[in-house]
Image (cartoon, rainbow, N blue to C red):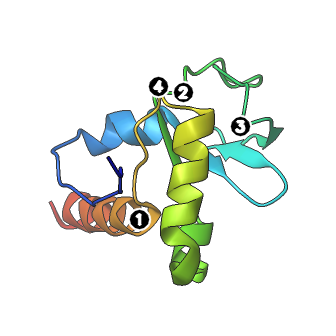
Amino acid sequence: MSRDYLRTYQTYDIEDVKKHLLIVGDLSSDCASCRQLGIDAATAKTCPNCGTEFKYITSRRIESHPGERYQIVKRWREKRPELPFIDHGDFSRTLGHKKARDFFA
């Protein structure tokens, strides 16, 4: 039976995601909490700088290369199946909305 990826929606605490998010790139990765660069996303369980445990993973590349979206997600789900893959665009928009609400509150 074929297995395909579908986007689904689930509620998350955006602050928890931000604190525990590993952002993968083409060459290296970074911690969303402290912005530490050069993290090996394939093996790192925690940030070497701030010690934050990674609970989620995302990639900026899925926004700039939409035709590769599912290949990127598939690759990282195979490498790190224990980490839910968060859509970077959704994360960025939601975080921006929260910052605007907090600013005007």
- Can you name the residue that lies furthest to the front here? 1
Residue 10 shown left or right of residue 35 in the figure = left
Contact (Cβ within 8 Å) of mark 1 with mark 3: no
Which residue is rendered at x = 59% and y = 45% of the image?
76
State which quarter of the image contains the C terminus.
bottom left
Q: Tag on residue 82?
A: 4
Which residue is rendered at x = 58% and y = 22% of the image?
52
Residue 96: image location, x then y, percent: 35, 67
Residue 100, image quadrant: bottom left
Q: Is residue 19 above or below residue 73?
A: above
- The residue at which mark 3 appears reads as 41
Residue 38: image location, x then y, percent: 84, 42
Q: Is residue 80 above or below residue 73?
A: above
Residue 8, image quadrant: bottom left
Q: Tag on residue 73?
A: none
Badge nearest the viewer, 2 or 4:
4
Which residue is rendered at x = 37% and y = 59% of the image?
91
Which residue is rendered at x = 44% and y = 42% of the image?
18
Mark 2 and mark 1 lie on one chain; the one further toward the N terminus is 2
Mark 3 and mark 2 lie on one chain; the one further toward the N terminus is 3
Label 1 environment density (alpha carbons within 10 Å; few <14, some 14–19, many ≥20): some
Contact (Cβ within 8 Å) of mark 1 with mark 4: no
Label 4 environment density (alpha carbons within 10 Å; few <14, some 14–19, many ≥20): few
Residue 3: image location, x then y, percent: 35, 50
Tag 1: residue type?
A: Ser
Q: Tag on residue 92?
A: 1
Label 3 environment density (alpha carbons within 10 Å; few <14, some 14–19, many ≥20): many
Q: Is residue 50 above or below residue 100?
A: above
Tag 2: residue type?
A: Phe
Q: Tag on residue 54?
A: 2
Separation of disc 3 and disc 2 at Cα? Answer: 10 Å
The answer, for residue 33, to whether it is visible in the render is: no
